[in-house]
Amino acid sequence: MPAKLQVSGANNSIKFFAAISLLWAAACTTSAEQLPHGMVEIPKGVFTPLYTSSSAERTAEVDETELVERFFIDERAVTNADYLEFVGRYPKWQRSRIPGLFADDSYLTDWRGDLDFGDTAKSAFPVVNVSWFAAVAYCRAQGKQLPTVAQWERAAAASETLENARDDANFSARILDWYTSPADRPLTEQAMGEGYRNLYGAWNMHGLIWEWTRDFNTAMVTGESRGDAGLQRQLFCGSGSIGAADPRDYASFMRFAFRSSLAGDYTVGSLGFRCSFEPAN
Amino acid sequence: MHLIRLSLFTLILFAWTHVSASEMSAANEPIIGEEEAVLTIAPNVPPPITRDHATKVIVNLETRELRGRLTDGVEYTFWTFGGVVPGKFIRIREGDLVEFHLHNHPSSRMPHNIDLHAVTGPGGGAESSFTAPGHSSTFSFKALNPGLYVYHCATAPVGMHIANGMYGLILVEPKGGYPPVDREYYVMQSEFYTKGSHGETGYQPFSMEKAIAEQADYVVFNGSVGALVGDNAMTAKTGETVRLYVGNGGPNLVSSFHVIGEVFDKVYIEGGDLVNRNVQSTLVPAGGSTIVDMEMQVPGRNILVDHSIFRAFNKGALGMIEVSTDEQAVSTELSTMVYSGKTSDDIYRPEGGAILDLQEEPTSRVAATQSDQIQFGKQVYNQVCAACHQPDGSGVANVFPPLAESDWLERGPVSAAAAILHGLAGKITVNGVDYNSVMPAMASLSDEDVANVVTYIYNTWGNPGGRIDASEVAGIRGE
């Protein structure tokens, strides 16, 4: 800070704050206009979440859609190579050092060592067996965050050609085909850069791995799924099939059911993640 | 006044405690010791419980998703309890404390849980066993009620988890067990809904649309077509008593369970306390069970079916119990008295009728004289014509014209023979009454028989007399 600001008193404090604000605004504007590397833009838009208010409250006037502000999402899931770099820089997230609180015993179980994910072919495959805490830490280290459920679902609703492919029977069939195939086939079957690229340019939102979200546990399908019909409210204690906007969208059910079975320290062999970025304005 | 209130209170308290007495006693029975449950794969069941006390039973059950054979040439992704459909059989005793460990194999795509119908508690355990892939859940329950109970996965979407094969049976034996039998087996009926039709080869994914419409492509016993057929058939010896623990995983259809060639000597209705006897087919609700006892007195192959019969023959709901004669438990004499098998094989010829096929036997006799013709013709008449024209030639008013004193016969024997050989249709008037019917052609009668019967008719019941012989009939036949 220039010395003369300190000497001039109140007037100069205002100038100081103005200068800082300008600098800050300039920084924000710059990063908002750059396309973050390896990310695709999801424009501001609406989508209908699976869980809405109960059917009793649903009227023509009530708008059930949810507005998702413009954001960016990684064009592909975080890979083993990406994650190796991360644990190299942040050793406390290495397998032998991570506290039990942040990941269960299966953390990176498919890696050969702290800094060795095994076969070089795996470098392009999505990293799996990582907990929510680890995913959050990774994204933060990139200056990003995990996408919210709303953001993830909005990005994932798109097929190659449609912004909202939920009514496309063909697209739904492809998703369900993956959901109903056992996860024992190794990820070699669908390496990065293969699969499908959706309308926004994101690769393999479906068909490769389940993905962590920031607020995965706000939609509670309880273990007793039959009782979910009686529960209320949008995302909290999700209202089962009666509250669902589209009971035929049982692929969404399965995603919500899967998310509900997780806790923050869980690691699963078919669960990875990608990050998102919310521009300041 | 106080006395009345006190008595009333005591009465109510007494009634309340005794209404739930059995459950209370099961809940309060002390737990002695601990054991690991023996789980079996269908159609086998674990051995009967021999201990006379309640114990802590540790059950370890793994959920696993895998590809397998649904029928020849058809592959399906099954979601299973224990790697098999139906899931493994659990056998415990009333009053036992079960420590249930549900493990979801890391290769699973889906979370799973378990609802055991024997459990008194939220979700039947489902709320406490919701498990992500590569994780385990543990919960405990006390078996308050004896009986045969279904268990199944209850993760959303529930119908899909069940439809893919996530069901099995848990038997809670009453104290003292069931009456002993020689053999026990585990049978579970269920349906499968596939995108393609029944038998369409290749990998078949699950069809939610058909499941909602309850249009099953496959209805099977023990998880696949032919699971209890041929080499996989259940077996017993002649004279043995067999007990079947039968479940119905659904997800939709109710079963009309029947064993062809056997009567259920005992049916523990819906797997509960009530016992029925001498039952042919018993209902097994979707998500329900039954227990049936049968004494196999006769050797042979007994077929298990769902008697909604197209499910058995067109969708796969067919199983077998082979009852052998080797080392049988009863004598051949006894079993033969019960069922003899075919003792004779004969030809069957119906009596009477308008058309008499005389190809096989030469009954047309050649008459030498007119009186012979009349005699032979009478036999032909009684066999062939009397059914309509009546034995006394009176016919049936407005339907079949009379032959007795019939003015139509004034046309002569040739016309009569023609009518017999070629039939007669359309309106005619006989003795002043109209008839508009059809007399079928009796072309199968021989020339002799036609000649004889016409001669008989013309010389009976006051008719004018006359005759015709076989060669004339042959000429008329040719026209």
Image: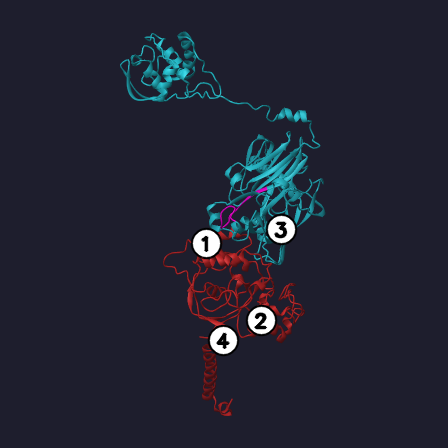
Chain colours: A red, B cyan
Q: Position of residue A55 (x, y in %)?
A: 42, 54
Magenta segment, which residues?
Answer: B188-200
Dot 2 corresponds to which residue?
Answer: A137
* Residue drawn at the location 46% of the way across and 21% of the way down: B359
Tag 1: amino acid: Arg
Q: Quadrant of residue A272?
A: bottom right
Which amino acid type corresponds to the residue marked 2 in the rendered image? Ala
Residue bearing mark 3? B83
What element does badge 2 sit on?
helix
Q: Provide the residue designation for mark 1.
A: A248
Is residue A252 visible in the rendered structure shown here?
Answer: no
> In the picture, residue B378 is in which quadrant?
top left
Of the residues shown, which amino acid type is indicated by label 3?
Gly
- Chain for disc number 1: A
Residue B93 vs residue A50, the one in the foreground: A50
Report the chain holding disc 3: B
Q: Nearer the viewer, mark 3 or mark 4?
A: 3
Q: Which of the two discs, 3 and 2, sits closer to the camera?
A: 3
Question: Whole-percent x and y of residue B105?
Answer: 62, 56
Question: Split into 4 quadrants, where in the image is the C terminus of chain A?
Answer: bottom left
Residue behind mark 4: A36
Figure check: A183 above or below B20: below
Q: Give the distance between the C-alpha atoms of the residues marked 1 and 4, in whole angstroms.
A: 36 Å
Q: Secondary structure at mark 1?
A: loop
Which residue lies most toward the left here? B432
Is label 2 or label 4 in front?
4
Sequence-earlier tag: 2 or 1: 2
Indicate whether B346 appears above or below B321: above
Q: Dots 2 and 1: beta carbons under 8 Å?
A: no
Residue B93 locus on image (x, y percent): 67, 42
